[in-house]
Image (cartoon, rainbow, N blue to C red):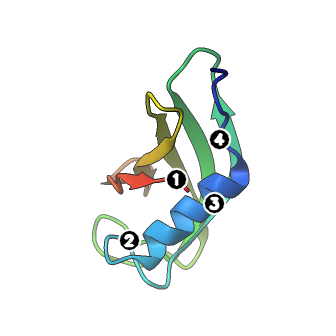
Amino acid sequence: PAATTLSVAQAQAALSEWIASEKGPSRDGSATVVTVREANGQTFAVADLKVKAFPDEDGHISPSEDPAEAVFSRQNDGSWVLTSVVWDFGRRTAVPDLEVR
């Protein structure tokens, strides 16, 4: 079967679900998907994000909009999983392990 691509809308929905959950970085936080990059033949996609109100490594909440990155992995059945989110210039990483609907 042809590989399914991950849409910006799917990536956005998964990130919003993660942020709203107890596993999320901050209930007041938000993430906006800017682009989704998928390399041919790869089993993962990378989403460039703009995040707001995500805590840094010292627990401070940044009032500005900062760059971040999310990695989605494609499963054998073609579904996608949000596997990691990296922010605070690589100092903070979360592993949501959340299935994309």
Disc count in the image? 4
Disc 3 is placed on an element classified as helix
The residue type indicated by label 3 comes to Gln
Of the image marks 3 and 2, the number of the one nearer the N terminus: 3
Give the residue displayed 38% in from the left and 71% down from the top. 24
Q: Residues within 10 Å of mark 3 (few under 14, many from 20)?
A: some
Residue at the far bottom in the pictured view? 28
Of the image marks 2 and 1, the number of the one nearer the N terminus: 2
Q: Nearer the viewer, mark 4 or mark 2?
A: 4
Viewer-nearest residue: 93 or 9: 9
The residue type indicated by label 1 comes to Val
What label sits on residue 6 in the rendered view? 4
Residue at the far top in the pictured view? 41
Q: Nearer the viewer, mark 3 or mark 1?
A: 1
Viewer-nearest residue: 1 or 11: 1
- Residues marked 4 and 1 touching at CB (< 8 Å): yes
Image quarter in which the C terminus is found:
bottom right
The residues tagged by marks 3 and 4 sit, at their Cα atoms, a distance apart of 10 Å
Disc 2 is placed on an element classified as loop
Of the image marks 3 and 4, the number of the one nearer the N terminus: 4
The residues tagged by marks 3 and 2 sit, at their Cα atoms, a distance apart of 14 Å
Side of 94 where 51 appears, left or right: right
What label sits on residue 12 in the rendered view? 3
The image shows residue 83 at horizontal and vertical percentages of 39, 45
Q: Which residue is mark 2?
A: 24
Q: Residues within 10 Å of mark 4 (few under 14, many from 20)?
A: many
Q: Which residue is mark 1?
A: 100
The residue type indicated by label 4 comes to Leu
Of the image marks 3 and 1, the number of the one nearer the N terminus: 3
Give the residue displayed 30% in from the left and 75% down from the top. 59
